[in-house]
Image (cartoon, grey):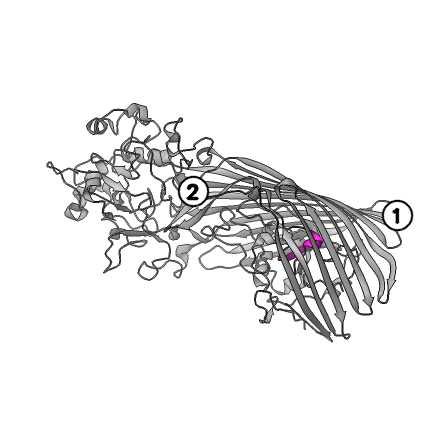
Amino acid sequence: MHAGYLVTAGSPLALVAALAGNPAAAQDLAANAADGAATIIVTGTLIRDAGRDAPAPVEVISAEEIARQGSPSILDLTRRLAVSSGVLGDSSQFDGRSQFAEGSASINLRGLGPQRTLVLLNGRRLAPSGSSSQPYVDLNLLPADALERIEILKDGAAATYGSDAIAGVVNIITRTGQQGFQGSAAYRHIDASDGDWNGALSWGGTLGPVRLLVSGGYQRRHELQIPDRDWALRPYPENPQGGYSGGGNPGNFDFNGPEGGMAFSADQGCEALGLGAFRSLPGSSADLCFTNFVAFTNIVEPEERFQLFADAEFELGERARVRLTGLYGRLETELNTSPSFLPTIAPSSAAAFGGGGLFVIPDYAPALADYCARFGAAADCAEGADGAPAAPALAFPVRFRPMLLGGNPLFDNDRNTARLPRDADSYRATAELSVELGGTLSLDASATYGEYDRRFFVSDNFVDPLQNALAGFGGPDCTYAAPATRAGLSNAQLAAIAGTQGCSYFNPFSTAIPANALTGAANPNFAGNGSPAGLSTAPGAGLVNDLATIGHFNNIWGRVANTQAWVGELVLSGGSGIVLPGGEASFALGAQYRRDRYERRYEGGNNLDLFPCPGSVLDPSATCSPETGALGFIGSNRDVAVASDVGAVFGEVQLPVADGVLAQLSARYEDYGAQGGTSFDPQVRLRVELTDWLTLRGGVGTTFRGPPPQNTLSDLVVLTFIGGAFRAIDVRANPDLKPESATTYDAGLSVERGGFRAGVDY
């Protein structure tokens, strides 16, 4: 029996299982190391072939153990680790930490944030994803089907590995000794979904003087919608916080104009639409319509991934060995989200009736006349002498949205939900040269290049064209869209030309919804079935919305996030010739150069250089301060490309001070240049074998995380829930950021007696 236990630093008195399955003993893995491999990678030390009795607290999970657990994904494994919490994985569009990162997965040691866990592949760095505000390595694109073991260093390790290892290190190590073909396939049934399945095929062996491994893996996850689980979508009285918004469609309007005291009330067609819409709770003083946006999202997004990994190794003369590895990973997924977002900024004066801080449906709009005639006194419309509306209807930016419960007809799917593609490509290549210098001395040189490309689309509304459409000046062919064409016209003159010369109306009321997109139930108040005011129901005439009008203010645009990492390293290690009572002291000395590059590009409507202001769509010369962009919700930004250069020198000694007593001393100096300053981090570890079955270990040191370039030289827009609504927040970069630092302590013991192995770490 194997048992592994961990006491986490976050809960120092709690003894918890380190893994749902049983971790393999490190000694077993050393015995099973691949034939012909030049070295055995040992996480926590720079000394080649240091053996697995180093004092670092390392958890080892072998491929055999993973297979006994049913071959879970790397993401599933990280969720089971007690030392890891708060990982990113499934749908998380409402979590600001992982926006735009659908389909990717992280590990988060000690819950300090995935950006503070250093993830390595065969001891070498990987390029992190630049999708979110904090960079982290996407585990989903690593070669899980070529895995030999995962080693988890449960302690800060900047002295050994440099920046980002504040919480610890996860080293994913691939097979080197495979002979012949190996394949696998699995399917997981999920109710209301088409299930998940994966397959893999690899071949290992020798071709002449070359040891070779080639592995390919494919994974497919199918969509699981929120409405497919009754616990996920509950009626408003049961769970008013479960995705119900007072800024939806049907929405909330003031029907008495600015002179009427600005009293917003629910669209009278709210309750007739059934599931997903609810009028204020009985006894509430508010009369508002709450509509559900979560019902248009997913519990699991559809995902398709594959990875291709190759590893070649050959001798170069009698004393040198070369190893070349390459990895390509591909992700294709999508974000299912609200049919349209609510605007959080108001239209500018460039739009018809804009500039007053509100959206305005003028009194001449056919949709308002139809609405008031349809609902009569209940609508509370201000009525003129001829029975027509005597005042405009007003909409506060966060009290309505163009489309929600009826779906967005621009997206052709079962819920007419906005489906926004996301995809990613990951590339990595390494070259390693190991040279035996004589005796136990060796020189290891390596060069690594990694790149992570993330592309994603966003959907939103141009607020000024939306306001124009409410006033009858919408659509791509409208002659009177530009402010200059309407300059100086009176209300009566605007009413006369609205909806003419290629211009069209947009109806924001429930009367424009043919049916509930979630249930398919027809809307009894749909204006397309006839208007009590005798108005035209032709598309674009003011009652029935047409695709051209919607597509003119609601659209999708792409964004690209690209990260690149170059790493060059040189390490000299071996025996020192100094013999202590416990044996010969060994050492490692080295230097490293890293270049990290970050680039982000914004296309079309979400680029501030193209559309800096709400009015920029209608008036290219429009100015504003601050520059909010032209989109109502998602936020905009400018293209940016930044890079940082990091140099480091480091050293380590292992001192067998007595039989069964091993000390490890490490130190590292890193220089981030003008953008990040410098950091010096020492560490001391000690391992003591009290008996042949009981071992104690402990350590103390400092560790750090250097500032990534996107946090020092560029800004990033994220969505944050503030004041009852999600808002686009510009996370400003700080060129004066210095490295984060921490002091870490660890203590632990391990027991090995007969077939029983266990460990405890604090």
697 to 618, vertically: above or below: below
Q: Is residue 185 visible?
A: yes
Label 2 packing within 10 angstroms: few (<14), some (14-19), many (20+): many
The one of 70 and 551 positioned closer to us in this rendering = 551
- The quadrant in which the C terminus is found is bottom right
Residue 95 on image: x %, y %: 47, 52
For the point 37% across and 50% down, the residue is: 723
Residue 173 on image: x %, y %: 69, 55
| 664 lies left or right of 10 | right
Q: Extreme left residue here?
A: 385
- Dot 2 lies on which element? loop
Q: What residue type is labelled 2?
A: Ile
543 to 621, vertically: above or below: below
Q: Does the magenta stretch include residue 162?
A: yes
Q: Is residue 296 magenta?
A: no
For the point 81% across and 55% down, the residue is: 587
Residue linked to disc 2:
634
* Dot placed on the residue nearer the N-terminal end, 1 or 2: 1
370 to 299, vertically: above or below: above
Q: What residue type is labelled 1?
A: Glu
- Per the rendering, the mark at residue 605 is none
Residue 11, quarter of the rendered image? bottom right
| 649 lies left or right of 223 | right
Residue linked to disc 1:
318
The one of 192 and 723 positioned closer to us in this rendering = 723
644 to 753, vertically: above or below: above
Residue 409 on image: x %, y %: 36, 41
The one of 551 and 628 positioned closer to us in this rendering = 628
Q: What's the magenta region?
A: 154-173
Label 1 packing within 10 angstroms: few (<14), some (14-19), many (20+): few
The Cα–Cα distance between marks 1 and 2, rounded to whole angstroms, is 60 Å
For the point 56% across and 46% down, the residue is: 331
